[in-house]
C-alpha cells in the first residue's frame, strides 16, 4: 500500500525512472465545519496545497516538469512568475542540481516567495512590468538561449497538478459535486479537470464535478469570457488585485479552463479584494487554516454563491486553497492590528488583558 503522495500515481505520470522529488502531494483535505455551518453547507472541504514542500500547489507541476527537464537533457530551467512558480522552480532545480532563471514583476511579488527564490539559488530578475510581460520575455529568452520553459504552457506542469483531483477523490471517497479553484494563468483548473477525466476514463469514477473558477474582481478575464460566451478571451491590460498571485491579465491556459468549466456545467465568478481578505481571516480564525490571499478566493467564491442561494446544502464541495499564509506576511501585517507592546512587568500585562 503506497503512502498518499504525488508519486503514488506514477503510472499516470510521464516521468521514466527516479523523479526529482521532495515528497510532494498527499496534502490534507479538511472539512470546513464552522464556515460550512455558517453558509448552510454540510460538505464543504478545503484541500490545503500550502502544505507542499515549497508551500504551494506548484510543487506538483515542478516535480514532474523538472524531472522531464533532466530526462530531456535540458541544462537550465526558467519561468516567469507571480511568485509561487518561481519559488517552486528554485526548490526543484536545487534538488535536481541545475540552474534556474526566474522573471518576476518588480515590486509585485509577496516577500516569502522572493525569499524562497533567492535562498534556493535561482537567478532572480525583476522586470519593470507585469507578469504577462515577464511571461512574454521568458518565452523569448528560452527560444534564444535554449533554456527549458516551465510555466504552465509546459504540459508537464499540468501533468503533475492533475494529481490534486486524484487525491481529493481518493480522500473524499467519491467525486465531489463541485471543485473550486482560484484562477490566474488557469493551469490548475485545467489540470484538475484533466485528472478527473482520466479517473473517469479508467473506470475509477463515473461522474465529473462542476469545475468552478474564482478570480479577483480587478483581474478576471476568464469570468468575462464565460459571461460573454467567448471562445477566445479578451486579456485584461492592467490586472489589479491585492491577491498578487492571481494578478494575471492574459491567462495562457484560458481555452482549457473555458472547456473545463463549460463541459462540466461549472461556472466562473469574481470576488472583491475585501471578500478575499475576509475569507483569509475566516479560514485562519474559524478553521485554523493559514493561506495567502489568492488561495482564499476559492472559498470566498463559495460564500458568495451560497449567499446567492446557488448551492444545495448537501452539495459535496472541494475548494483548493493553493498557497501557505507565510508566503505573504506583509499583507497580513497590513490587515491586522499590531501586537500590543507593554513594559516587561506583570501589572502592565494584566492591564492590557483585562
Ligand atoms: C497561491 C496561488 N493560487 C492560485 C494561483 C492560480 O493558479 P493558476 O490559475 O494555475 O495560475 C497561483 C498562480 C501563481 C502563478 O501563476 C505563478 O506563481 O506564476 C498561486 O500562486
Image (spheres, helix red, strand yellow):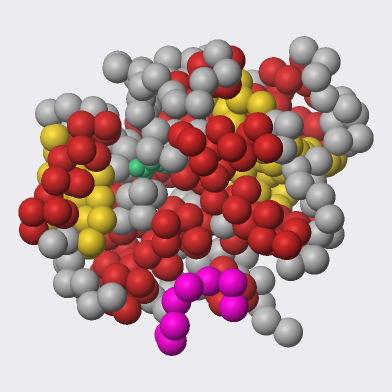
Queried whether the magenta region covers residue 15, the answer comes back as yes
Residue at image coords 66%, 77%: 3
In the image, is residue 222 above or below residue 124? above
Q: How many marks?
A: 0
Residue 235: x %, y % from top left = 36, 22
In the image: residue 309, left or right of residue 198: right
Res 125 quadrant in image: top left
Queried whether the magenta region covers residue 12, the answer comes back as yes
Q: Which residues are magenta?
A: 11-18
In the image: residue 224, left or right of residue 166: left
In the image: residue 260, left or right of residue 286: left
Res 16 quadrant in image: bottom left
For the C terminus, give its image quadrant: top right
Residue at image coords 65%, 32%: 262
Which residue extends farthest right?
314
Residue 21: x %, y % from top left = 43, 74
Front residue of this view, candidates 168 and 295: 168
Front residue of this view, candidates 198 and 97: 198
Q: Main secondary structure of the magenta part?
A: loop
Residue 205: x %, y % from top left = 81, 59
Residue at image coords 51%, 41%: 256
Which residue extends farthest front?
231
In the image, is residue 319 above or below residue 235? below
Residue at image coords 36%, 49%: 153
Asked whether residue 336 is in view, the answer is no
In the image, is residue 278 above or below residue 299? above
Ligand 1: image quarter: top left
In the image: residue 151, left or right of residue 324: left
Which residue extends farthest left?
144
Res 150 quadrant in image: bottom left
Amino acid at each position: 500500500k503506497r503512502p498518499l503522495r504525488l508519486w503514488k500515481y506514477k503510472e499516470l505520470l510521464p516521468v521514466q525512472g527516479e523523479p526529482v522529488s521532495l515528497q510532494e502531494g498527499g496534502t490534507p483535505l479538511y472539512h470546513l465545519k464552522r464556515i460550512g455551518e455558517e453558509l448552510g453547507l454540510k460538505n464543504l472541504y478545503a484541500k490545503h496545497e500550502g502544505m507542499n514542500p515549497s508551500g504551494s500547489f506548484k510543487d506538483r507541476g515542478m516535480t514532474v516538469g523538472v524531472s522531464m527537464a533532466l530526462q530531456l537533457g535540458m541544462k537550465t530551467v526558467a519561468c516567469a512568475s507571480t511568485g509561487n512558480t518561481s519559488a517552486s522552480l528554485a526548490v526543484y532545480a536545487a534538488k535536481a542540481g541545475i540552474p534556474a532563471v526566474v522573471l518576476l514583476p518588480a515590486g509585485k511579488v509577496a516577500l516569502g516567495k522572493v525569499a524562497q527564490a533567492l535562498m534556493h539559488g535561482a537567478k532572480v530578475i525583476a522586470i519593470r512590468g507585469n507578469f504577462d510581460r515577464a511571461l512574454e520575455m521568458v518565452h523569448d529568452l528560452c527560444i534564444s538561449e535554449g533554456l527549458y520553459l516551465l510555466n504552465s504552457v509546459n504540459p508537464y506542469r499540468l501533468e503533475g497538478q492533475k494529481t490534486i483531483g486524484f487525491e481529493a477523490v481518493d480522500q473524499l471517497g467519491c467525486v465531489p459535486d463541485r471543485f473550486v479553484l482560484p484562477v490566474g494563468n488557469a493551469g490548475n483548473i485545467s489540470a484538475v479537470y484533466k485528472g478527473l477525466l482520466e479517473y473517469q476514463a479508467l473506470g475509477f469514477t463515473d461522474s465529473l464535478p462542476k469545475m468552478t473558477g474564482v478570480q479577483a474582481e480587478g483581474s478576471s478575464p476568464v469570468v468575462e469570457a464565460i459571461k460573454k460566451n467567448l471562445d477566445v478571451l479578451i486579456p485584461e491590460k492592467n490586472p489589479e488585485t491585492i491577491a498578487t498571485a492571481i494578478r494575471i491579465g492574459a491567462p495562457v491556459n484560458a481555452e482549457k479552463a473555458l472547456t473545463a468549466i463549460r463541459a462540466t456545467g461549472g461556472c466562473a465568478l469574481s470576488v472583491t479584494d475585501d471578500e478575499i481578505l475576509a475569507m483569509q481571516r475566516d479560514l485562519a480564525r474559524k478553521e485554523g487554516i493559514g493561506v495567502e490571499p489568492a488561495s482564499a478566493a476559492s472559498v470566498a467564491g463559495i460564500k458568495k454563491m451560497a449567499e446567492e442561494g446557488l448551492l444545495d446544502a448537501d452539495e459535496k464541495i472541494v475548494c483548493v486553497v493553493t498557497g501557505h499564509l507565510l508566503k505573504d506576511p506583509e499583507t497580513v501585517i497590513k490587515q491586522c492590528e499590531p501586537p500590543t507592546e507593554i513594559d516587561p512587568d506583570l501589572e502592565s500585562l494584566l492591564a492590557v488583558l483585562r
